[in-house]
Image (cartoon, coloured by chain):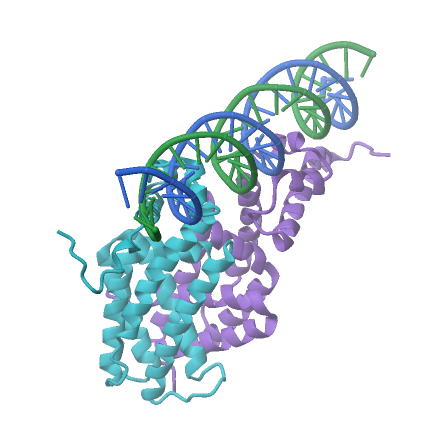
Chain colours: A cyan, B purple, C blue, D green
DNA sequence: GATAAAAATCGACACTGTGTAGACTTTCTG
DNA sequence: CAGAAAGTCTACACAGTGTCGATTTTTATC
């Protein structure tokens, strides 16, 4: 029996609409998986979420907005995970840990991440979301490189520029590998780790 | 007066349609530049080429076919340039030359190359075209790495796998840089070259 | 637990872009 | 110059999008 608990003003927080919103995003993710973005229609999403097109437009103004929301939801998850990085670690260990975490992220969210990348050009908001995410990674890579002794300037062979290139290498390599299989992803990770280590001058 | 030259069976080779086809592709490229793929409509292309939509469908079955043809035309150009590679060169020189050539390619054809990459997922034919192109580059990088002393096996830290990752690094880095400016492209090239050299163990 | 406001839903409509069909015109070829 | 081939046009049918006003359901409040 729901007595009047003091901290109970939270009860009404679960509007019906919140459930629907989640249903819409979940359906969108599912459809993305086996129809692809272009083939997926607003009607499909609505149907999957158990409402009509008209009702869906109450929640989101367009197909793009739906996908943007989905990307935002996923990307937020990435940020949480990234915040938990063991920053102050020995470079070699830090690199290994980062790559391992990246494999996990792509295993869990590969589909949405690929979609985000694909739509970065077309949908400015997704582009921003993804750029911000990339910047986090680049900053992390830069930090590791510098701790490994790479200079910190802005020249093309110094830490920030190298970190950027390495980030794109990882993004693209994982993008392709995650379309194939978990094994490929693991191999890709090993290759990227090796190149990262070499670039950091840690080939002792 | 067009007399009956022996080698004149070539006269009829320039059908009116050939001119139109070229006009369509040129228009498509122009529109791609300042409207983007999604915003560009079949009607726009037709209008730019001086015909109606109906007439355009005589040449190409869809918007995707038009863009595929444009990509094919561009990519063919890339292949020609690639064939002229000075394969047998000292690694350090080979890498510098390859990067220089890549900068030129992206300066000339950046727009279409970016479009090809964007549509690789959506349009299978473009995906194949681009994959084939990437494979050429990967093979070239592999050759250089091996000549520089990197082992030739299939393990993640041996030549082919590394070449693949380096290729994606270059693709993605140039993709982003070519959206900004020629200077950025030059910087990007320097960074990629540095990482490639390091990966090849040529940091004497 | 009645009630009024807010939230959610629906069906119909207008609009834009796609691809097709059939009739018509131009251009080649013998 | 006649028939065929190549090229072009207008009109149509169809898919999907986004908007609107009417209607129903939920939720908060007394």
Count the marks: 0
x and y, in percent, of residue A93 in the image: 22, 80
B140 relative to B77, above or below: below
Q: Nearer the viewer, residue A36 or B94?
A: A36
Residue at 37% x, 64% y is: A171
Asked if residue A132 can be seen in this view, the reply is yes
x and y, in percent, of residue B92 in the image: 44, 78
Q: Nearer the viewer, residue C6 or B86?
A: C6
B147 relative to C7, above or below: below
Q: Is residue B88 left or right of residue A106?
A: right
Dividing the picture into quadrants, the one containing residue B180 is bottom right
Quarter of the image with the C terminus of chain A is bottom left
Q: Residue furthest left?
A: A1
Q: Residue furthest right?
A: B1
C25 relative to A67, above or below: above
A184 relative to A30, above or below: below
Asked if residue B120 can be seen in this view, the reply is no
Dividing the picture into quadrants, the one containing residue B137 is bottom left
Q: Nearer the viewer, residue C11 or B160?
A: C11
Q: Is residue B191 left or right of residue D24?
A: right
x and y, in percent, of residue B79 in the image: 52, 55
Residue at 25% x, 56% y is: A11
Q: Nearer the viewer, residue B189 or B6?
A: B189
x and y, in percent, of residue D18 in the image: 53, 42
Residue at 22% x, 57% y is: A183
Residue at 33% x, 61% y is: A174
Q: Is residue B69 left or right of residue A190?
A: right
């Amino acid at each position: 029996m729901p007595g009047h608990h003091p901290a109970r003003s939270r009860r009404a927080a679960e509007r019906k609409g919140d459930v629907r919103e989640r249903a819409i995003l979940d359906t969108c993710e599912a459809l993305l998986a086996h129809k692809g973005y272009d083939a997926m229609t607003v009607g499909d999403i609505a149907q999957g979420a158990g409402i009509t097109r008209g009702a869906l437009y109450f929640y989101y103004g367009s197909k793009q907005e739906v996908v943007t929301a989905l990307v935002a939801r996923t990307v937020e998850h990435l940020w949480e995970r990234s915040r938990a990085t063991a920053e102050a670690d020995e470079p070699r260990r830090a690199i290994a840990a980062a790559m391992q975490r990246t494999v996990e992220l792509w295993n869990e969210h590969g589909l949405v991440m690929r979609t985000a990348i694909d739509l970065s050009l077309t949908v400015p908001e997704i582009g921003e979301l993804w750029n911000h995410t990339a910047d986090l990674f680049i900053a992390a890579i830069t930090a590791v490189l510098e701790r490994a002794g790479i200079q910190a300037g802005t020249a093309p062979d110094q830490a920030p520029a190298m970190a950027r290139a390495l980030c794109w290498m990882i993004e693209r390599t994982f993008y392709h590998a995650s379309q194939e299989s978990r094994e490929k992803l693991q191999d890709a990770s090993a290759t990227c780790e090796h190149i990262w280590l070499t670039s950091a001058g840690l080939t002792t």
